[in-house]
Amino acid sequence: QVQLVESGGGSVQAGGSLRLSCAASGNIYWTSCMAWFRQAPGKEREGVARIYTRGGDTYYADSVKDRFTISQDNAKNSLNLQMHSLKPGDTAMYYCAADFRIGGYCDTEPQYWGQGTQVTVSS
């Protein structure tokens, strides 16, 4: 089992940058994958980015490709999301997630979730 705590959210103007971090209580080395999701008011939850622990393969939603970068620091038990060129459409609650199952389910329904950190982008 692992507990996830996000940080780094805040308010920024369009075009700005933020770096989200997710601190894990357990050893994330044993995860199959970790991911960032987001949910804006009145919208469905959306997968933003995910990373597979073995091999480091990463995947991004088309809406954030070339602007966001996901990274995992096993030594610090943390997951990060560097966000550049932020847009008002990026405004949402951002959630960190982790999955330990073989193959990972970070594109659908990961096992463990954090409480979220709010990102607000103003125009």
Image (spheres, grey):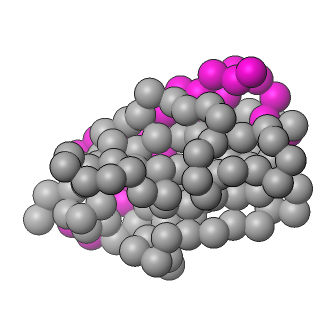
State the residue in front, 60 or 112. 112
Report the residue at 67% width, 28% height from top. Answer: 24
87 w.r.t. 43: above or below? below
Residue numbers of the magenta segment: 1-29
Nearer the observer, 67 or 107: 107
Residue 67: image location, x then y, percent: 45, 72
Q: Is the C terminus in the top left, top right, bottom left or bottom right quadrant? A: bottom left
Q: Position of residue 99 (x, y in %)?
A: 72, 40
Residue 80 inside the magenta-drawn segment: no
Can you see residue 6?
A: yes
Picture quadrant of residue 63: bottom left
Is 83 on the left-hand or right-hand side of 80?
A: left
Identity of the residue drawn at 74% across and 21% down: 1
Against 91, residue 101 (above or below) is above
Q: How many numbered discs sit on the rendered protein?
A: 0
Extreme residue in the left direction: 123
Q: Is residue 29 left or right of residue 118?
A: right
Residue depicted at x 46% and y 77%? 62
Residue 82 in view: no
Q: Position of residue 88 (x, y in %)?
A: 20, 63
Residue 100 x/y as whole percent: 79, 38
